[in-house]
Amino acid sequence: MKITINLRFVFLIIISGYFLGLNVQNVYSQDPPKKNTIRLKADYIKTMNKEIAFNLRASSKVDGSNIDVANIELTVFNEYNDDSVKLGSAITDSEGKSTFVVNDLNLIKPDSTGLYNILVSFKGNDAYKRASKSLSYKDATIEAKIISKDSVNYITATLKDTATDSVLSDQILNVQVQRLFRPLRIGPEFNSTDESGTIIVPIEEGIPGVDGMLTFEVVLKDNDDYGTVKAQVTAPLGVPVVDESTFDERTMWSPRNKTPLFLLIVPNLITLGIWGIIIYLILNLIKIKKL
């Protein structure tokens, strides 16, 4: 009897160990969660005498649909001569976009060929694999100014390669005026620089501006070698904007403290008149009841 109990006990231990081993094996044999691949995009933008920035964007294809990747940190490096310098980092917004502005221009240096090499890196997380994007560009400058000839105002601009100090011909430069929502394009649709790297565009009359001031932009846009380069010129060449705002006046669309007087007086007089009639009738009813 004792031997039978011991055999049953050994049998139970063997069976328990077998199933426990299967469970452990299943746990360790499970594949890790699949991570999605991120696509990074980087564009270089230079505004003369102001700043250098990189427009960054992160997207991914999840379950067959392209989505914007929000709230991830993208780190920007400058690589030159086998060296890598961290410029900083930026967090993407709800649309997967972010603008990284270079605060210290001394950190950005070209390699021996005059080419600037930028690396945008994402270190990865639980949902996405790590990714990187390389961006290379040359430095260019735009010198823009306003000139007057035969009583006509023109904006002229010259495009140069900074490293070689040579002019760049046959390049498209857009001329536009800063507006509230989107720039106002002026001049021909295609303004190609001539052999001296220069364009000249007449400025139309009658463009409105606050106090008559207009800010003109000359833009080399999305160039394969030089990225986007902007030059801005401000001049009093516009028609002063007449302030037609009724913010401080009593109008129908003003806030409550600016309600028109007739809307305050007339309704109150009507209300008082109605209550006066009601009170008069009540008093007469009281007198009738006392009779």
Image (cartoon, rainbow, N blue to C red):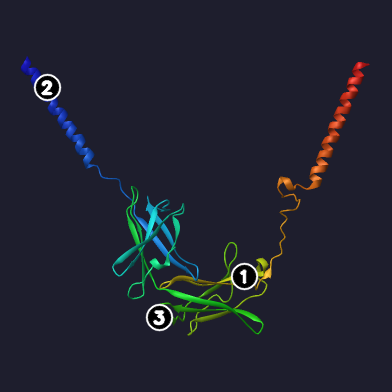
At x 40%, y 61%, the residue is 41
Give the SS element for disc 2: helix
Q: Nearer the viewer, mark 3 or mark 2?
A: 3
Give the SS element for disc 1: strand
212 sits to left or right of 61: right
Q: CA distance from mark 1 to mark 3?
A: 33 Å
The kind of residue tagged 2 is Phe
State the image coordinates of residue 29 (x, y, percent, origin top left). Answer: 21, 42
Q: Count neighbours of disc 2 (C-alpha within 10 A) and say few if under 14, some if 14 to 19, many if 20 or more.
A: few
The kind of residue tagged 3 is Thr
The answer to whether 274 is drawn above or below residue 160 in the figure is above
The answer to whether 143 is drawn above or below residue 263 in the figure is below
Q: Nearer the viewer, mark 2 or mark 1?
A: 1
What residue is disc 3 on? Answer: 164
State the image coordinates of residue 117 (x, y, percent, origin top left). Answer: 35, 68
Which of 117/58 is in front?
117
Which of 166/184 is in front?
166
Q: Which mark is residue 9?
A: 2
Residue at the limit of the structure toward the top, as seen here: 1
The answer to whether 106 is drawn above or below residue 172 in the figure is above
What residue is disc 1 on? Answer: 214
The kind of residue tagged 1 is Leu
Of labels 3 and 2, earlier in sequence is 2
Q: CA distance from mark 2 to mark 1?
A: 94 Å
Viewport quadrant of the C terminus: top right
Q: Count neighbours of disc 1 (C-alpha within 10 A) and say few if under 14, some if 14 to 19, many if 20 or more.
A: many
